[in-house]
Amino acid sequence: MVSKQTTTTTLCEMKQKDAKITMLTAYDFPAARLLNEAGVDVILIGDSVGMVKLGYESTLPVTVEEMLHHVKAVKRGNTRALLVADMPYLSYELDCAQAARNAGRLVKEGGAHAVKIEGGGLDAVAVVKELLRIHIPVMGHLGLTPQSINRLGGYKVQGRAARDAERIIAQAQALENAGVFALVLECIPSDLARKITSTLSIPTIGIGAGPHCDGQVLVLDDALGLTESGTPKFVKHYANLRSAALAATSAYCHDVRKGLFPAAEHEFKDTPR
């Protein structure tokens, strides 16, 4: 396990050395501790917290205050990973001053090292430049952008049509020119991801974008098999912890109801005088 602090510069060096970047989500202190011990390079405090932990139907309801709560918890459990905080919907789109205030809070109050924004249009480029002006590193996000889910019409693969692929490539180049230090590519064809990755000098991190990106990211709960409902095609289950947890809690309920827990070994006895 590498103990050195991971920085935005570290990721660029990893791309140059063709060393793959590992990135997972975390939303709380114990998850952050776990990922640090495992040696994960980047921890994303994603607005996916809304769906994974808060029970929202999408990421859209997540607020800056909710993000701050989780960023602070992850920060307390982190020792070496680069912490990237998602900027939630309507925290950066309206104007650059608003974006700077909210990103500043995630860094100054929350302890994030960088923020991530979705989209690659002119407005997104302007936001990137403003955040860099106040020394906040920015990660970009193209392809399937969950905050645009209503416009996209669902969680669909993006960039299959030639015109759409060309647009994503142009946006990737625009974001790199604006100064993003890395780019998440979500749910795009693997050939398109390979082309973008070979074109850019900054690292790409894929999720449902095939094996040719410079790194990969998954939602931790999906990877650990904790998600209750079905998971996307691109998710690999590295464990099935939900089944194990369900069995354990069911066994606990059984033991309590039958008077089997607590047993003698769980009791405190009076100290002999």
Image (cartoon, rainbow, N blue to C red):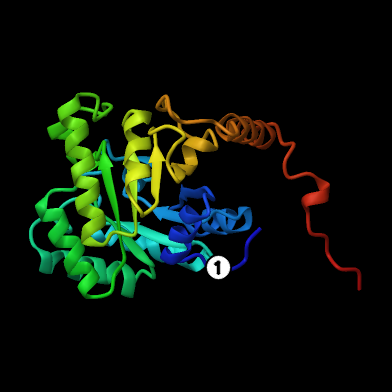
Residue 3, percent from left and from top: 62, 66
Q: Secondary structure at mark 1?
A: loop
Number of marks in picture:
1
Q: Quadrant of residue 198?
A: top left
Image location of residue 197, percent across then percent down: 37, 43
Q: Residue at x 18, y 58 (%)?
A: 91
Disc 1: which residue: 79
- Image check: 248 left or right of 103? right
How dense is the environment of label 1, judged by Cα within 10 Å: few (below 14), some, or many (20 and up)? some
| Kind of residue at disc 1 | Thr
* Res 261 quadrant in image: top right
Q: Is residue 64 above or below residue 55?
A: below
Q: Is residue 71 visible?
A: yes
Up the image or down, 203 lies above or below 254; here it is below
In percent of the image, x 13 and y 61: which residue is there?
A: 126
Percent position of residue 176, x then y:
26, 55
Is residue 61 in view?
Answer: no
Where residue 195 appears, x then y in whole percent? 33, 37
Left or right: where 171 falls relative to 187: left
